[in-house]
Image: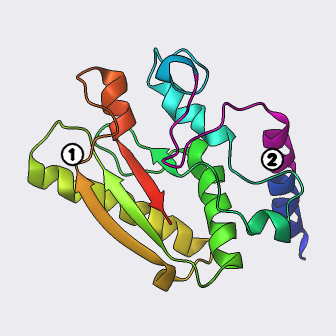
Amino acid sequence: MRLKPYVRSLTIALSLVAIAGCSSTGGTQGGTSSGAGGAGAGGTGTSTSGYGSGQAGSTGVSSGAGQMADSRIPDVRTIYFAFDSDTIRPEFQSVLEAHARYLRANPGTQVILQGHTDKRGTREYNLALGERRANSVKRYLDVQGVSPSQLEVVSYGEERPAVRGNTEEDFARNRRVVFAY
């Protein structure tokens, strides 16, 4: 029976419609929010979850999904990770699925997955953690049907922070993988 793939496709389509109906603050090429005062999505900037949940709302895919949506690079190009983790958080799965759709629809396109960490830990450990994060994203995209030849992994560790500072929010914004097309 082929009901399961149909239900999965229907669920994804309904999720896209729900996401398209939500308002977003948009994002820059790096995927960071451009809300008031440089705060994360939601405008508060007071919790690390602002970068976890707010960014996933804008996948860069219009509600008129299909060939037209697959021709644009998704707007959100940054996903964030928990401290000392390379596990993809559920709120970023829709972002990764949008990138997978784009890359499958554009097989000549290549992307560099740039892994980053906060400044805690040794330089060597952070380079390895950044690489594990980028490889985690690469594996996710591979499972979604993206050709491995389209993906390159680079780790910058703590060397290229998105923000400088010592607060937990600063650290959270630096624990990321950036899609560089």
Dot 1: element: loop
Query: Where residue 163 sits in the image (x, y, percent)?
Result: 32, 33
- Which circle marks residue 158 in the picture? 1
> Residue at horizontal 57%, vertical 73%?
143
Figure quadrant of residue 105 = bottom right
> Residue at horizontal 78%, vertical 41%?
19
In three-dimensional space, the C-alpha distance between marks 2 and 1, rounded to whole angstroms, equals: 34 Å
Query: Where residue 172 sits in the image (x, y, percent)?
Result: 37, 32
Q: Counting residues from the N terminus, which is met first, the one under dot 2 or under dot 1?
A: 2
Q: In the image, is residue 8 part of the stretch drawn in magenta?
A: no
Q: Main secondary structure of the magenta part?
A: loop
User: How crowded is the residue under tag 2: few (<14 C-alpha within 10 Å), some, or many (20+)?
Assistant: some
Q: Please state which of the two labelled residues, at mark 2 or mark 1, is closer to the viewer.
A: 1
Query: Where residue 43 sits in the image (x, y, percent)?
Result: 58, 18
> Residue at horizontal 57%, vertical 47%?
92
> Residue at horizontal 86%, vertical 51%?
63
As drawn, 147 above or below 155: below
As drawn, 88 above or below 119: below
Figure quadrant of residue 1 = bottom right
Q: Amino acid under label 1?
A: Glu
Query: Where residue 75 sits in the image (x, y, percent)?
Result: 63, 50
- Which circle marks residue 41 in the picture? none
Dot 2: element: helix
Along the line of sight, the residue nearer the viewer: 100 or 160: 160
In the image, which residues are magenta? Answer: 14-35
Give the residue pinned by disc 2: 15
Q: Amino acid under label 2?
A: Ser
